[in-house]
């Protein structure tokens, strides 16, 4: 068996499968988990690869440790999406975090990952975590000055993830953040036309919402093109000048991808990506 994903009308990714571990149809989407020889276990939503055990650490490291290294005093965190549990797994390594709200619209994703993806879902029972099975857009709309950090780990802007790319959503995230709050999100790829359009729209809305706005890069082999951008927005903290490298290194966290030397470098973009961002 092979799993095939169209990265563009002219490019297809094929991954050989060993076993089909789970398949279900929720009210929101189709959920599949496969065992593969090259990428380990693979989470598929609506026919698109969301996570592989081989490279998930890149994505989760960069969404969590980049903002945490900027402000180690963050206590309250909101996670939107992230049903696989990888974001929470990294967050609970910080003893200073007192509470995490995780809002995932599809309970089937969480249940399937608990059973078949223990590598990422192992910390979903942490005492500091409260799970909410509801729409992230509606949830954040009700919050004001409540979170030090918001992490948006959404699917692409299709189906249940569509509302998490709107101008209203970014404005609600801004309102939900505390004085020096930070929001990070996945923005999209830089290789294929559809991914570029999503990335540019997300970047444009972050820039129009937050006084401090930027994007940074991560290299995730299983994602279309491999070169992926993450968004950064803050009410006051600069992603490079406010980096607390020495304090973060004193924590002694063993990370597979992130380090404080990589941190400022990840905000440097190649010229062709700078052009795409300027066009946005």
Image (tube, grey):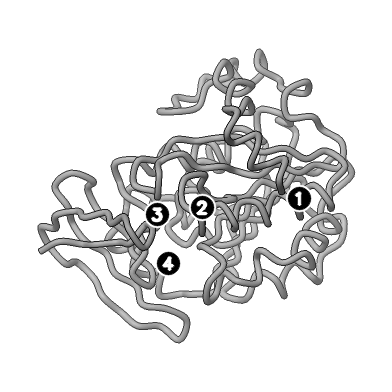
Residue pointed to by mark 4: 110
For the residues bearing labels 1 and 4, Cβ distance under 8 angstroms: no
Give how far across and how far down residue 174 sits, in percent: 83, 55
Q: Which quarter of the figure has residue 55?
A: top left
Q: CA distance from mark 2 to mark 1?
A: 31 Å
Dot placed on the residue nearer the N-terminal end, 1 or 4: 4
209 with respect to 139 (left or right): right
Tag of residue 56: none
- Look at discs 3 and 1 and give the one toward the viewer: 1
For the residues bearing labels 2 and 1, Cβ distance under 8 angstroms: no
Residue pointed to by mark 2: 126
Give how far across and how far down residue 216 sits, in percent: 61, 35
Residue in the picture at 80% in, 47% down? 207
Secondary structure, mark 1, is: helix
**Dot 3, how many residues are within 10 Å of its Cα: few (below 14), some (14-19), or many (20+)?**
many
In the picture as drawn, the residue positioned furthest to the bottom comes out as 27
Secondary structure, mark 4, is: helix
Residue in the picture at 24% in, 71% down? 22
Dot placed on the residue nearer the N-terminal end, 2 or 1: 2
- Look at discs 2 and 1 and give the one toward the viewer: 1
Q: CA distance from mark 4 to mark 2?
A: 14 Å
Residue in the picture at 66% in, 46% down? 184
For the residues bearing labels 4 and 3, Cβ distance under 8 angstroms: yes
Give how far across and how far down residue 128 sits, in percent: 60, 52
């Amino acid at each position: 068996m092979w799993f095939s994903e169209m990265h563009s009308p002219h490019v297809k990714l094929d991954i050989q499968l060993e076993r089909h571990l789970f398949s279900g149809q929720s009210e929101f989407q189709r959920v599949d988990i496969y065992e593969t020889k090259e990428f380990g276990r693979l989470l598929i939503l609506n026919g698109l690869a969301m996570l592989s055990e081989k490279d998930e650490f890149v994505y989760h490291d960069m969404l969590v440790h980049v903002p945490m290294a900027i402000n180690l005093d963050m206590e309250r965190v909101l996670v939107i999406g992230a049903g696989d549990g990888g974001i929470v797994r990294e967050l609970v390594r910080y003893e200073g975090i007192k509470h995490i709200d995780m809002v995932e619209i599809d309970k089937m994703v969480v249940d399937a990952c608990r059973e078949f993806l223990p590598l990422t879902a192992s910390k979903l029972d942490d005492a500091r975590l409260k799970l909410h099975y509801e729409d992230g857009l509606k949830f954040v709309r009700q919050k004001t000055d409540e979170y030090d950090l918001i992490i948006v780990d959404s699917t692409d802007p299709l189906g249940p993830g569509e509302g998490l790319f709107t101008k209203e959503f970014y404005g609600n995230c801004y309102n939900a953040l505390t004085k020096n709050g930070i929001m990070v999100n996945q923005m999209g790829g830089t290789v294929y036309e559809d991914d570029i359009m999503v990335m540019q729209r997300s970047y444009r809305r972050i820039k129009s919402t937050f006084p401090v706005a930027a994007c940074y890069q991560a290299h995730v082999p299983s994602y279309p093109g491999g070169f992926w951008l993450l968004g950064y927005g803050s009410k006051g903290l600069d992603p490079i000048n406010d980096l607390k490298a020495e304090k973060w290194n004193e924590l002694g966290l063993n990370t597979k991808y992130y380090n404080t030397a990589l941190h400022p470098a990840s905000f440097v973009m190649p010229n062709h990506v700078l052009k795409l961002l300027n066009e946005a």
